Amino acid sequence: MPGELTSFFWSGDTLRSRSVSRIVLSDTLDVPAPSARVLADWQREITSQLDLEAGDVEPMSLARTQARWPDYRHCVQAMVAWTDALGLPGALASSDVALMACRGARYHHDGAQYGGAAFCNLFLSEDKGLDVHFPLTGQRIPLVRGTAMIFDTGQPHAVIPRGSSGFCEADFAPDQDLTQVFLTWELPVEDARIAQALNVAFDTAPATALHLDDEQVWVDGAPASLCPDTGSWKPVGQPG
């Protein structure tokens, strides 16, 4: 099991370093079920435009859902109330929201694109027997309608079948409905409230940050890559 993870992220025009939080804040909120019309819209978009394959995570049209689903606002209100109760008032109001769909997800981190953020997600689909798995902590969070979570973008995670030990494409047969639709917000980790909630420390490797050119996550002071099937780390350049 690796020790310290370090995220190198853009702060304006400067690369900074920070710790990667292993904290996952989660709850199950009472949110309305999407209408039959909205579910039909999602299914058409997923099958005709996204063509999701096992492990894919892709954006969807949020504006269409907002226009066709009056109860959408209740989902946002539930998330606002939850984040307010966590001591993060106004956090969502100042963050962009996107609608996403996934058909499972391979083990990955998002620290190479969103190193300066924490993800705040609300799942809108019913329980289809899938979990979000965080291999560093062993946490498995069942995905049901109303599952809410906040976690560090640098922390590895995957969406896998409940009871499985890793990601396998064969678990997502084409004839099975295993798509999850969710809302996601990017919360700025440099916001003192977000950093405190996730216990993030900044400028943990300033000398290294000076010599890098892009966002990335290091393990135990060295570059490393993540196995998409198991969620285990290996040093960059190591075979297998």
Image: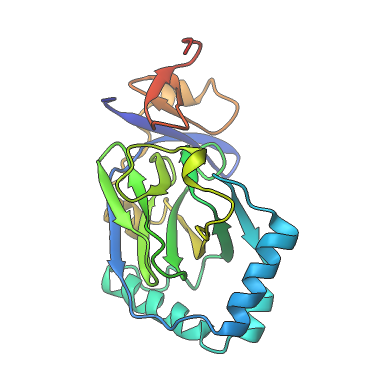
Q: Nearer the viewer, residue 55 or 147?
A: 55
Q: Residue furthest right?
A: 48
In this orientation, does residue 110 appear?
no
- Which residue appears at 48% of the width and 26% of the height? 209
152 versus 166 height, above or below: below
In this orientation, does residue 80 appear?
yes
Q: Position of residue 143 (x, y in %)?
A: 37, 61
Q: Position of residue 214 (x, y in %)?
A: 59, 30
- Which residue appears at 38% of the width and 37% of the height? 166
- Which residue appears at 64% of the width and 85% of the height? 68
Image quadrant in which you'd find residue 234: top left
Judged left or right of residue 229, residue 67 is right
Judged left or right of residue 119, residue 135 is left
Judged left or right of residue 12, residue 49 is right
- Which residue appears at 50% of the width and 84% of the height? 73
Image quadrant in which you'd find residue 97: bottom right
